[in-house]
Image: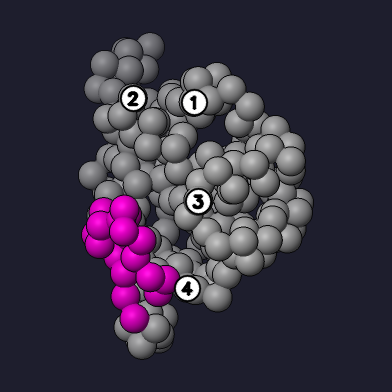
Amino acid sequence: MNANAETNNGQLFLVAAPSGAGKTSLVHAALKNDPNLVVSISHTTRERRSSETDGVNYHFVSQQTFARMIAEGQFLEHAEVFGQYYGTARKQVDLLLAQGKDVILEIDWQGAEQVRQLVPDVIGIFILPPSVEVLAQRLSSRGQDSEKSMQVRLSQATLEISKAPNFDYILVNDDFEVTLADLLCVFRALRLRGKRQIAGNPAIADILSDS
């Protein structure tokens, strides 16, 4: 699977962060600002929260269904996170890329490593909080997790943050609007690469053929 090749396919992006760094809010804002961006909706075995909708936030499935999908090779990546499973359906991503869409995978570091093995030209973006202390405050203020769950997330944050150097871009979410602008710049810059410009812009192809 090659996300861009020498066609007008879209680009595949990985966006990862420790819980509470603001990844989801940034991605949602980017989608509103850039109509060519889409998010691949993941499958998960965790319970649906009251604020979530099946097929919009996640595809919520049973442990048995998830295991069957793994056995059938349906996932581009899958991982266990906090005792629950998450995975990205390969077919859905391939379809979106073939439509010329830039696809974002909101993903953890384990899944990111799997995708890199299958998609060499994937672009990874890691969102960092300003500090671990700020991260703890954000998790506490959400009120979505129990105290025990929050402590587990904080204990995992150090490991997750240590994986940031494996990504192509690192953004520190200190000022939301500044970080959003930086994120949109990354998406825009990748569309200006030579092969994609030539494949997707007939005027450029004509200029080059006449030179």
How much space separates mark 2 and mark 1, taking CA atoms?
A: 10 Å
Q: What amino acid is found at the position of numbered circle 1 in the picture? A: Leu
The image quadrant that residue 54 belongs to is bottom left
Q: Residues within 10 Å of mark 2 (few under 14, many from 20)?
A: few
Q: What amino acid is found at the position of numbered circle 3 in the picture? A: Gly
Residue with the mark numbered 3: 143
| Count of numbered circles on the image | 4
Sequence-earlier tag: 4 or 3: 4
Q: What amino acid is found at the position of numbered circle 4 in the picture? A: Tyr
Residue with the mark numbered 2: 33
The image quadrant that residue 207 belongs to is top left
Question: Which residue is at the front of the view, 197 or 99?
Answer: 99
How much space separates mark 3 and mark 1, taking CA atoms?
A: 24 Å
The local secondary structure at tag 4 comes to strand
The local secondary structure at tag 1 comes to helix
Magenta-drawn stretch, dominant element (helix, strand or loop): loop
How much space separates mark 4 and mark 3, taking CA atoms?
A: 22 Å
Residue with the mark numbered 1: 180
Q: Which residues are magenta?
A: 45-62
Measuring from the top left, give residue 90's x and y in whole percent: 35, 64
> What's the residue at 38%, 12% (across, down)?
211
Q: Is residue 54 magenta?
A: yes
> What's the residue at 46%, 50% (across, down)?
106
Q: Is residue 118 left or right of residue 7?
A: right
Question: Which residue is at the front of the view, 50 or 32?
Answer: 50
